[in-house]
Amino acid sequence: MTDEQGTSGAVLVVGGGISGLTAALEAAEVGNDVFLIEKGASFGGRVSQLNQYFPKLCPPSCGLEINFRRIRDSRKIRTYTMTTVKSVSGSAGNYEVVLETSPRYVNSNCTACGDCGVACPDEVDNEFNFGMDKRKAAYLPHEMAFPRRFVIDKAALSSAGADAVKDACKYDAVDLEMETKTVTVSVASIVWATGWTPYDPTKMENLKYGQSKAIVTNMMIERMAAPSGPTGGKIVRPGDEKEIESIAFVQCAGSRDENHLEYCSHICCMATFKQMSYVREQYPDAKIYVFYIDLRTPGKYEKFREVRMADENASFIKGKVADIIPEADGGVTVVAENAVTAEKISQKVDMAVLATGMQPSLVLQGTPADLQMDSNAFIISDFDKGMIAAGCAKKAADVVTCTQSSTAAALKAIQVSRR
């Protein structure tokens, strides 16, 4: 099915994370029509997976709920989830963009009552929690999901499960015959807010991710620490749920490495200091070891760093980790060379956290348009073409920088639409 819609001067925002939400709202609030699309089943992006974010150590609800309400109340913004860009044709001021929306298998009758999820017998790994627990094949994407509507993973649904979810829904919201739809929109400019994905830790063979449940990533720690996460907010070792007596943070896991990500991912040091505070709140006496190349906490974050480095139970070792050795008791030994003393260090810990870097999502998704990109696949804005990059699609950045970048991107997109 193909529809055509759009108005003169409309803006397409690709990506529904904090950057895309910000850009869409800024463009809409000065009068432009906006199409906001998101490839996932709900808006919120990576921020929705965090326990807290800077600068105020707010939970995701702090920034997302108000934006969701503003999006819901805006008559200028049309939203599409489970939607991707298939093709872009035309030129600045007059683009035709073909969008493809995958079936949710749940229609607008859904009230998110959860009966289908309760009845569904089929489970798969929960990607939102990085596989640390299971979700049903009929599920709400996460606690803050917007739109608040269930989605059915038809590929994971058995025939018995299909009958169970249909029978459980008293609102006639389950529609397993839904098909992929396409829509063509006419827009003047496009804001690319396609975000980031954590760098694949299995590519760093020496860090042994996947060979021990004691080796986790920084995003997994965020989900553990979150009250809505797989452990109800408790940081424990996956698998045996051992409480933490010692923990190592491995900085630059993939970043600043010509074999992986050649750039600094900007947020990893601050993420580790933040996660140290999570650990310290739960385990006042736990030993914390931080292995680093450099500690980068610019400007106002210096004081935050100083407080964590003053922790008498925290040790900071300047040296890149060469190996992580899984141990029989479920822990691991982190091996590194101290760059200051030239001493080889082997530190046994209950859990090791890999501070994996930020990789632009388009590296994995591919680009459906003729975009200028740098050597690391970050988008270079082309004002003349009306192709504007925002947030982590433009560069590795924290939430504050992303919202500033997205406001600027919206202003540029508006200028293209009105020239």
Image (tube, grey):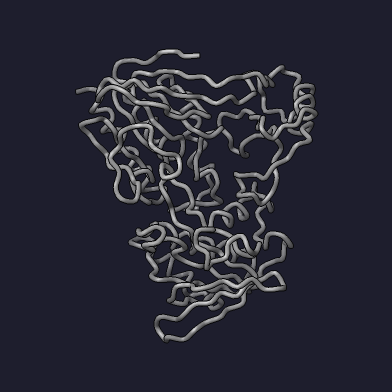
Q: Position of residue 94 (x, y in %)?
A: 27, 20
Q: Residue 189 vs residue 392: left or right?
A: left
Up-down relation of residue 77 to residue 49 (above or below): above
Q: Name the residue rendered at 25%, 25% in the picture.
A: 92
Q: Name the residue rendered at 40%, 83% in the picture.
A: 340
Q: Position of residue 219 (x, y in %)?
A: 54, 54
Residue 410 appears in which quarter of the rendering? top left
Up-down relation of residue 273 to residue 229 (above or below): below
Q: Nearer the viewer, residue 65 or 349?
A: 349
Q: Residue 166 vs residue 383: left or right?
A: right
Q: Position of residue 239 (x, y in %)?
A: 72, 60
Q: Name the residue rendered at 24%, 36% in the picture.
A: 382
Q: Nearer the viewer, residue 147 or 134?
A: 134
Residue 294 appears in which quarter of the rendering? bottom left
Q: Position of residue 138 (x, y in %)?
A: 69, 32
Q: Residue 98 vs residue 72: left or right?
A: left
Q: Quadrant of the C terminus?
A: top left
Residue 384 appears in which quarter of the rendering? top left
